[in-house]
Amino acid sequence: MSIIFGLLKERNETVSESELLRASVVTECYATGPGHTYVKGRLGMGLQPYFSHQRSEFELRPLADSHRRVVSFDGRLDNYKELITELALSNADQLDSRIVLAAFDRWGEECFSRLVGDWALALWSEGDQSLYLARDHAGARTLYVRQEHGALHWSTHLDTFGAFGTELCLADEYVARYLAFVPMREVTPYKGVSSVLPGHYATFRNGAISCRAHWNAIVRTTTRHKSDEEYEAHFLSLFQQSVERRTGPGAPILAQLSGGMDSTSIVCMSSSRSKTHEFKINALVKALAESHRQFKDPIVGSQDDDVARRVQYRRANLTVVKVLLHRDTYLLGKRSVDKIRDVVPNMLAVYNHGSNLLFGVRFTVLS
């Protein structure tokens, strides 16, 4: 994920670019490209990009609009096409950050509830001198904040706060919650540093922070159909929509999956949609050597797991690489590594440089 961070000082103070550059040093190792900053008056924002999908390659810096608002956006909007249409934006390839600014201009604080996807953002409104820090409903992206001596610091990484010049001390409440298996909620390992809760947005205005929910898990509507077939069609439509939103054009897609019914269904649906949208998906199957259980497969009947999955993958026209998981090590045959390198050369850049890390897990190449 991209790293967004920033600093908001009191009204009679100004932020220097050197302060942001100093804070950016500790997180530049997580970025895939050079970072950029935005400094104006008492506000400073920084963004270090991590390109996770095709559209994210254009999210390089904090973005400002003509209404004196600035946003730093980390993540992806899955419903960007619907928002572009609803907001009557002219370019179908609008940046997610520009969509956020247009949504805030239309709906104000209510816009956060309309953003579907994995995201975290910081939005500054010069008109009412307000800073908004928001996260998606599931909390897929992190976002932390600290208020100190009238100033506000925020970042998607905890590393940043030590670089702002204040000593970080272990929070006793964090230790107590961890040992007691109590949910952390807004508590972090460091005193004075809090997490913005998933599905919430924090507003910093006139020296005070308030927090409100923009999403609620309670469903107040009921879906009623006349037959099982209509329920099945409705589910299939939603399933197709969710998979399509996550698999789009760009580089070849590699799916790392267990080989069970859930992950297999997702990959096969994605593969079937890729024929229409002209992108390619390949499957990397992770299987435990000792997991051989019998089950009733709707496609091939009662057969061994591995055989049944291979039939599904073949019918979906997928390139499949089998990976055995032994404790914490991936055991990859040399041919498998070569095949994966052909599919996702960027992901194997660490392998090409001699490191034995793949997908964040240590692996051993077998000849």
Image (cartoon, rainbow, N blue to C red):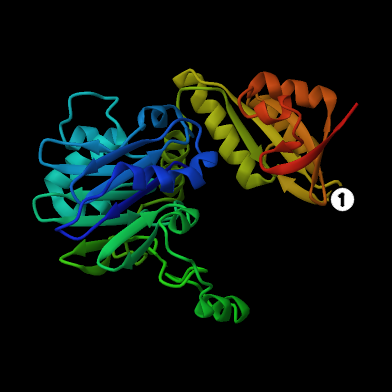
State which quadrant residue 354 falls in.
Answer: top right
Q: Is residue 60 left or right of residue 319?
A: left
Classify mark 1: residues with Cα within 10 Å, few (<14), some (14-19) or many (20+): few
Residue under the image location 10 percent in, 40 percent down: 67
Q: Quadrant of the C terminus?
A: top right
Q: Is residue 110 above or below residue 78?
A: below
Q: Is residue 347 left or right of residue 197?
A: right
Disc 1 element: loop
Q: Is residue 358 left or right of residue 104?
A: right
- Give x and y (percent) for residue 96: 31, 36
Asked if residue 57 can be seen in this view, the reply is: yes
Q: Nearer the viewer, residue 1 or 318?
A: 1
Q: Is residue 19 above or below residue 102?
A: below
- For label 1, the residue is 290
Q: Nearer the viewer, residue 326 or 125?
A: 125
Q: Nearer the viewer, residue 175 or 37?
A: 37
Q: Is residue 307 left or right of residue 21?
A: right
Residue under the image location 20 percent in, 41 percent down: 101
The amino acid beneath tag 1 is Glu
Residue under the image location 13 percent in, 49 percent down: 126
**Among all residues in the image, which is located at the extreme right?**
367
Asked if residue 201 can be seen in this view, the reply is: no
Q: Nearer the viewer, residue 43 or 103?
A: 43
- Give x and y (percent) for residue 1: 48, 42
- Give x and y (percent) for residue 180: 60, 82
